[in-house]
Image: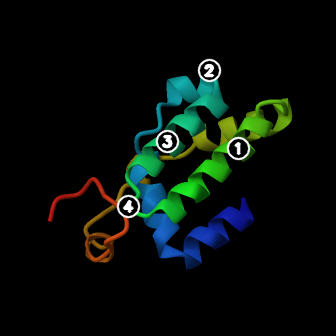
Amino acid sequence: RDLLCLHFEFDNAYRFRFQDTFVELDKFNLAKNPIKEFLRLLDIMSSKEKRVEVKDTWHLTKLMFEFLKYDKEIREILKNAFLRLNLEKCKINEYDMPYCLGRKDYNFNIKK
């Protein structure tokens, strides 16, 4: 958790991608099958990328999640952590928009 939060804190590119995509998290599907739901979100994130190099990053991340489906304890930790997530607080807000709109490497779900 700490490494993930540190990464998002200091890397705006991934933080904004997370904010843009994870608001689409379906908590019902997450409770049923967390790995499948994360793979779906990674597919969404990958589809919005404009650069192949970053799409490759999401592909490698998906491979990691494929291995996690064999670890019940990790699945439960992920499920419980993300079920508690307040998606409204994760959304891109008016303070984030100027940073997102300037990015040319990702298709955000916001209007200019």
Residue sitting at x 41%, y 45%: 23
Residue type indicated by callout 1: Leu
| Label 3 to label 4: alpha-carbon separation | 13 Å
Q: Residue furthest front?
A: 52
2 w.r.t. 71: above or below: below
Residue at which label 3 appears? 43
In the rendered view of the protein, which quadrant contains the N terminus? bottom right
The crowding category of the residue bearing disc 2, from other C-alpha atoms within 10 Å (few below 14, some 14 to 19, many at least 20), is few
Q: Are marks 3 and 2 in contact (CB under 8 Å)?
A: no
C-alpha span from label 1 to label 4? 21 Å
- In the rendered image, residue 44, in percent from the top left (x then y), is placed at 43, 43
Q: Residue at 43% across / 57% down in the picture?
A: 19
Nearer-N-terminus badge (3/4): 3
| Foreground of the two, 61 or 31 | 61
User: Is 17 situated left or right of 73 in this image?
Assistant: left
Q: Which mark is residue 32?
A: 2
Whichever of callouts 3 and 1 sits on the residue coming sooner in the sequence is 3
Earlier sequence position, callout 3 versus callout 2: 2
Asked if residue 46 is positioned above or below residue 51 in the image, the reply reads: above
Reading the image, the residue beneath label 4 is 50
Residue 56 versus residue 39: which sits nearer the camera? 56
Q: Secondary structure at mark 3?
A: helix
Q: Amino acid at mark 3?
A: Asp
| Numbered circle sitting on residue 63 | 1
Q: Residues within 10 Å of mark 1 (few under 14, many from 20)?
A: few
Point 57% across, 53% down: residue:
58
Could you tell which of marks 1 and 4 lies nearer the N-terminus?
4
Front in this rendered view, residue 112 or 89 = 112
At label 4, counting other C-alpha atoms closer than 10 Å, the crowd grade (few under 14, some 14-19, many 20 or more) is few
Q: Is residue 87 left or right of residue 53?
A: left
Residue 20 image position (x, y, % from top left): 39, 54
